[in-house]
Image (cartoon, rainbow, N blue to C red):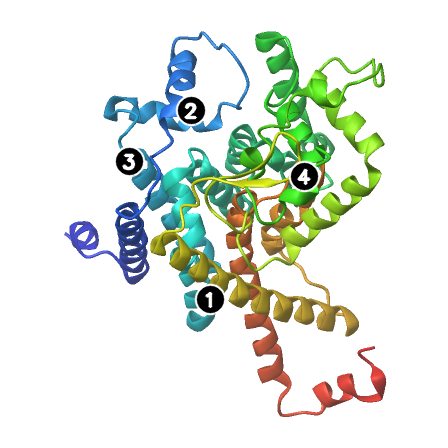
């Protein structure tokens, strides 16, 4: 009888989780009514079916999103049901990550971050693998925080198979994973597990596709990233569109340089770097600025803007400047400004604790790794907000944890002179 009552009347935390999931998913469904772009799951249909038939044809995109789509092939590629389902699961996992914050006021701020991020909501609807990336990233973090190694490893791998840029974060987090050093074999296997999976993935790709590349689209992305005109694109324009008239390797390959590089697009990118060092440096600076400091969505503008064939002018196509998009950009701008304020406060807290000799311990550090390690593939390839908006969300629980700890520290010492002593005599600096 007691068990039946518990099923009919769930405890407070479960009720709160259900309300949160319903609210977030309901907001997503409302936003869907205003989106001027189609659901992009159709591009994964062929790959999902090829996996089911054991007839893999290419590795242009890795298989993570296609694997997640398989259970929903019955609904049809134009159906939004898979997006709604995976977004609801993401909201549920994020709710339980935020539970680790403890204090309600800080937890509430972290919880608001998911539905408040208008751009992430938009991307989950319009970008095929974004909602899959979000779910796998949150599950990876949740099991890492819960010290459950095998599911952490599994979802970290699936995350990398969805977006290869996460391999650096995956390897770093598994290396940081706490394990008993006395059990030598288990310690070595645990620490090297992510690297072993990377090797297995490379070997598997080489066997299946005759190329160890994590995604064969990477060479095209490399040429985008190191195209001599990239510095004209960031942060205003979508580089896929902006550079569409200047993506032929023959435009860059005019001699026999880098003859040992087989892929013509990688070769063209390397030649562009060598022959245009000023353009390259400007573009890399813009990447760092766009990744860490920009409070606007990158690219800033929606629509079609592209460099003319003679590279002397920028052509304005369909601008897509609807009120929905403009207000969405404004909402994201406000979200990001608040995010950066909290981020600055959290960094101040970490600096403060470092100066007084107090170590920050705990698996919460895992929440930081995906964001900061993301700059590595960003510099090698390119930076847009869609590639980091999920990791920015993951940082919010960490920011609230640090601020909660700071307030607890202040409350603990407000009745004595310890804080005054810390700040006196230039102890901080």
Residue 146 visible in the displayed image: no
Q: Which residue is mark 1?
A: 102
The secondary element bearing badge 2 is classed as helix
Q: Earlier in the sequence, mark 4 or mark 1?
A: 1
The disc at residue 230 is 4
- Packing grade of label 2 (10 A; few <14, some 14-19, many >=20) is some
Is residue 168 placed above or below 333 in the rendered structure? above
Q: Which residue is mark 3?
A: 80
Q: Residue furthest left?
A: 1
Q: Earlier in the sequence, mark 3 or mark 4?
A: 3
The disc at residue 270 is none
Q: Which residue is mark 2?
A: 67
Q: Are marks 1 and 2 in contact (CB under 8 Å)?
A: no
Q: Are marks 2 and 3 in contact (CB under 8 Å)?
A: no
Q: Measure the alpha-carbon separation of dots 4 and 2.
A: 33 Å
Q: Earlier in the sequence, mark 4 or mark 2?
A: 2
The secondary element bearing badge 1 is classed as loop
The secondary element bearing badge 4 is classed as helix
Q: Position of residue 72 (x, y in %)?
A: 30, 26
- Packing grade of label 1 (10 A; few <14, some 14-19, many >=20) is few
């Amino acid at each position: 009888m007691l068990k039946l009552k518990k099923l009919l009347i769930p405890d407070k935390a479960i009720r709160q989780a259900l309300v949160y999931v319903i609210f977030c998913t309901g907001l997503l469904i409302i936003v869907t009514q205003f989106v001027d772009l189609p659901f992009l799951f159709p591009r994964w249909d062929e790959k999902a079916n090829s996996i089911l038939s054991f007839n893999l044809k290419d590795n242009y995109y890795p298989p993570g999103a296609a694997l997640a789509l398989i259970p929903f092939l019955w609904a049809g590629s134009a159906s939004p049901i898979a997006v709604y389902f995976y977004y609801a699961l993401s909201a549920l996992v994020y709710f339980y990550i935020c539970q680790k914050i403890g204090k309600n006021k800080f937890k509430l701020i972290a919880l608001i971050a998911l539905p408040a991020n208008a751009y992430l909501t938009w991307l989950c609807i319009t970008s095929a693998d974004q909602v899959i990336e979000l779910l796998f990233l949150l599950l990876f973090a949740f099991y890492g925080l819960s010290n459950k190694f095998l599911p952490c490893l599994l979802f970290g791998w699936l995350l990398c198979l969805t977006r290869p840029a996460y391999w650096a974060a995956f390897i770093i987090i598994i290396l940081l994973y706490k394990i008993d050093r006395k059990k030598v074999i288990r310690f070595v296997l645990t620490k090297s597990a992510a690297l072993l999976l990377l090797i297995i993935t490379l070997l598997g790709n080489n066997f299946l596709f005759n190329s160890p590349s994590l995604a064969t689209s990477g060479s095209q992305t490399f040429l985008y990233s190191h195209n001599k005109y990239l510095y004209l694109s960031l942060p205003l324009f979508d580089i896929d569109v902006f550079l569409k008239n200047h993506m032929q390797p023959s435009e860059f390959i005019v001699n026999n340089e880098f003859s040992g590089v087989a892929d013509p697009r990688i070769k063209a990118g390397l030649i562009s770097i060598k022959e245009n060092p000023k353009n390259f440096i400007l573009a890399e600076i813009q990447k760092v600025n766009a990744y860490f400091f920009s409070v606007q969505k990158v690219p800033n503008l929606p629509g079609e803007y592209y460099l003319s064939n003679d590279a002397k002018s920028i052509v304005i196509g369909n601008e897509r400047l609807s009120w929905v998009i403009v207000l969405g950009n404004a909402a994201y701008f406000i979200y990001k400004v608040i995010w950066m304020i909290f981020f600055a406060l959290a960094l101040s807290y970490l600096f403060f604790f470092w100066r007084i000799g107090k170590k920050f311990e705990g698996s919460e550090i895992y929440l930081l790794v995906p964001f900061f390690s993301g700059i590595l593939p960003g510099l090698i390839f390119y930076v847009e907000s869609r590639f980091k908006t999920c990791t920015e969300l993951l940082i919010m629980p960490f920011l609230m944890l640090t601020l909660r700890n700071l307030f607890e520290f202040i409350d603990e010492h407000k009745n004595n002179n310890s804080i005054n002593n810390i700040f006196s005599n230039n102890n901080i600096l």
